[in-house]
C-alpha cells in the first residue's frame, strides 16, 4: 500500500465544505465517466454506509466499492471521515479531516492509502506510482467539489 496526501484550503465554513465534499451527485458531475451512488437501502452517507463509484465507457468499466467507517461531521473543533475502499481493482483507505482555519476558512486534509489487490507482490512498487499519479487528480476533484 502507498499513501498520498492532498491539502486544500477553502473559504467555506467547515459544515458547508463537508456537505459539498460528501455530496455524491457532485462527485458524479465532476469525475469523468463515473457515477457515484449510495448502496441500497441507504438514504444518506453515515457510519456503516456503503457507496460505489462506477467508472465505465460503454460496457467496459469497474466498480470502486467503499464503506464509511467513521463519520464525524464538523463541529467547532473540526470533523473527520474514514472510508475503506474494498474493490477488487482499487482498495485502500481514505481519511478526510476538516479543521477551521484563519478568517473562517477550512483546511481539508485528504490522506489516502492506495492498494492494487490484483497486482502480484513482486510489482507492489507500482502502487507507489499509482498513488503519485492519483494525487494531482484528487487535488483537482477536491477543489472542484468545493467551488
Image (tube, rainbow, N blue to C red):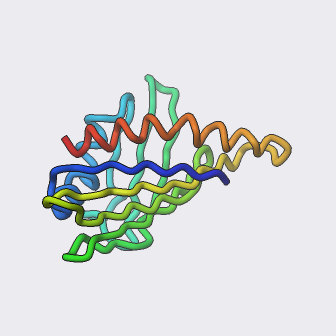
42 over 116 or under it: above or below: below
Q: Residue furthest right?
A: 122
Q: Quadrant of residue 130?
A: top right
Residue 15 location, x and y as percent?
17, 64
Q: Nearer the viewer, residue 41 or 47?
A: 47
Residue 127 at x, y percent in the picture? 67, 43
Residue at the spot 45% in from the left edge and 24% down from the top edge: 57
Q: Is residue 13 left or right of residue 62?
A: left
Residue placed at 20% from the left, 61% from the top? 102
Q: Quadrant of residue 47?
A: bottom left
The residue shown at (58%, 39%) is 132
Rendered residue at 20%/62% (across/down): 14
Residue 124 x/y as whole percent: 76, 45
Relative vertical location of residue 32 with respect to residue 65 in this rendering, above or below:
above
Q: How many marks?
A: 0
Can you name the residue that lies furthest to the top here? 58
Please identify the quarter of the rendering in which residue 118 is found. Answer: top right
How far from the left and from the top, in percent, is residue 73? Answer: 25, 71
Between residues 120 and 94, which one lies in front from this camera angle? 94
Q: Is residue 6 left or right of residue 40?
A: right
- Position of residue 136 relative to residue 100, above or below, is above
The quadrant in which the C terminus is found is: top left
User: In front: 109, or 115?
Assistant: 109
Nearer to the camera, 24 or 146: 146
Quadrant assignment for the N terminus: bottom right
Amino acid at each position: 500500500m502507498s499513501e498520498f496526501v492532498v491539502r486544500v484550503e477553502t473559504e467555506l465554513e467547515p459544515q458547508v465544505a463537508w456537505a459539498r465534499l460528501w455530496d455524491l451527485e457532485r462527485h458524479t458531475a465532476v469525475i469523468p465517466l463515473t457515477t457515484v451512488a449510495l448502496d441500497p437501502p441507504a438514504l444518506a452517507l453515515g457510519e456503516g454506509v456503503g457507496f460505489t463509484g462506477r467508472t465505465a465507457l460503454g460496457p467496459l468499466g469497474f466498480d470502486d466499492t467503499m464503506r464509511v467507517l467513521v463519520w464525524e461531521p464538523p463541529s467547532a473543533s473540526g470533523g473527520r471521515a474514514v472510508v475503506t475502499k474494498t474493490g477488487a481493482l482499487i482498495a485502500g483507505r481514505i481519511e478526510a479531516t476538516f479543521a477551521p482555519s484563519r478568517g473562517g476558512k477550512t483546511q481539508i486534509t485528504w490522506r489516502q492509502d492506495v492498494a492494487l489487490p490484483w497486482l502480484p507482490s513482486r510489482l507492489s512498487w507500482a502502487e507507489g506510482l499509482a498513488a503519485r499519479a492519483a494525487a494531482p487528480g484528487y487535488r483537482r476533484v477536491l477543489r472542484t467539489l468545493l467551488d
